[in-house]
Amino acid sequence: MDFLLQLLVNGLVIGSVYALAALGFVLIYKSSRVLNFAHGDFLALGTFVAFAMATSLRLPVIPSIVLTLIAFFVLGLIVERVVLRPLIGKEIIAVIMVSIGLSSVIKGVMYLIWGPGYFLFPEFVPDIPIIIGDLYLSPLHLVALVISAAFLGLFSLFFKHSTLGVAMRAVADDQQAALSLGVSVRKIFAVAWGIALLSAVAAGVVVGSITSLSTEGLATIGILVFPAVIVGGLDSVPGAVIGGLLIGVLENLTAGFLDPLLGVSLRSVVPFIVLVVILMIKPYGLFGTVEIERV
């Protein structure tokens, strides 16, 4: 029972990171119907930039993270303005290919600067274990859970109570209606990209503080975000959170029970199996909007 509880706790920690990363992906899709295949690469790049500020520039860890979050929010605005805005009205395949190309460019830059090696994010939380009975709690895991929950809570308040957040929800629901009410759709697109990159970097820093940093390892989170997003529903913010938590818990339960039993690693496969099963039952995900087209 204690082993199961330990796996559930660890799964919730990892799942909260997936949820935070998935939130940015959903925001971009919900506001502009763009699938950002470079999301995981932005996550990795932001984490490495925070790492470089803390190690190469010798800045304290917390200010390094804050400066990186601000910088990537601005970068999101620039990417939307320079790369994506000229593609408004173009075929969706053109936008997808641009995001894939952007992913390749970011990977190339990271390999050029940091190479394929592994790095340790500077420690900013004392790694003294908290033991409750047979349950082992790492302070880093607790901090990761708190940071993810705090960001998700702040985003929830932003969307519900701020003028800009309400405008973003209006654009996501009906762009034409939002335009008729004087909402700048292009401004909303830019802000969505800024928030998406900010949430991606926050998720990357959380992962980087728990595990070692590597270009492929961090970018892989972007791939694991896809099952979380699609299971929850591509256009559902609550679905992204629930999908992320679900995938994180399933991964850890698989690693704890199935992998030792079968002698093979299935933790990265199970999320996609769950994805297929759920889509067979609910094609738009658990909380996705069902679209009915009349012809």
Image: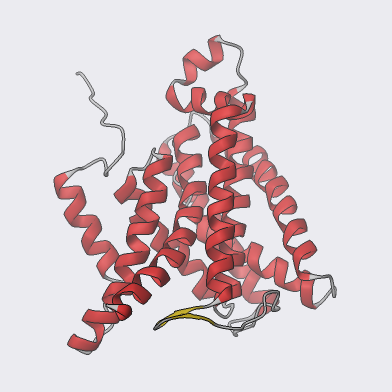
Quarter assignment of residue 78: top right
Quarter assignment of residue 49: bottom right
Q: Is residue 93 left or right of residue 41?
A: left
Q: Is residue 277 left or right of residue 57?
A: left
In the picture shown, does residue 141 fall above or below 145? below
Q: How is the image coloured?
A: secondary structure
Q: Nearer the viewer, residue 22 or 125?
A: 125
Q: Is residue 4 left or right of residue 166?
A: left
Residue 37: x, y in percent?
Answer: 47, 54
Q: Quadrant of the N terminus?
A: bottom left
Q: Residue furthest front?
A: 133
Tell me which residue sits at (20%, 19%) in the image.
Answer: 294
Tell me which residue sits at (69%, 52%) in the image.
Answer: 72
Residue 16 visible in rendering: yes
Residue 276: x, y in percent?
Answer: 20, 56
In the picture shown, does residue 10 fall above or below 192? below
Q: Nearer the viewer, residue 212 or 14?
A: 14
Q: Nearer the viewer, residue 143 or 24?
A: 143
Residue 85 visible in rendering: no
In the picture shown, does residue 293 fall above or below 287? above
Residue 33: x, y in percent?
Answer: 44, 36
Tell me which residue sits at (30%, 50%) in the image.
Answer: 231
Tell me which residue sits at (50%, 22%) in the image.
Answer: 170
Residue 85: x, y in percent?
Answer: 60, 34
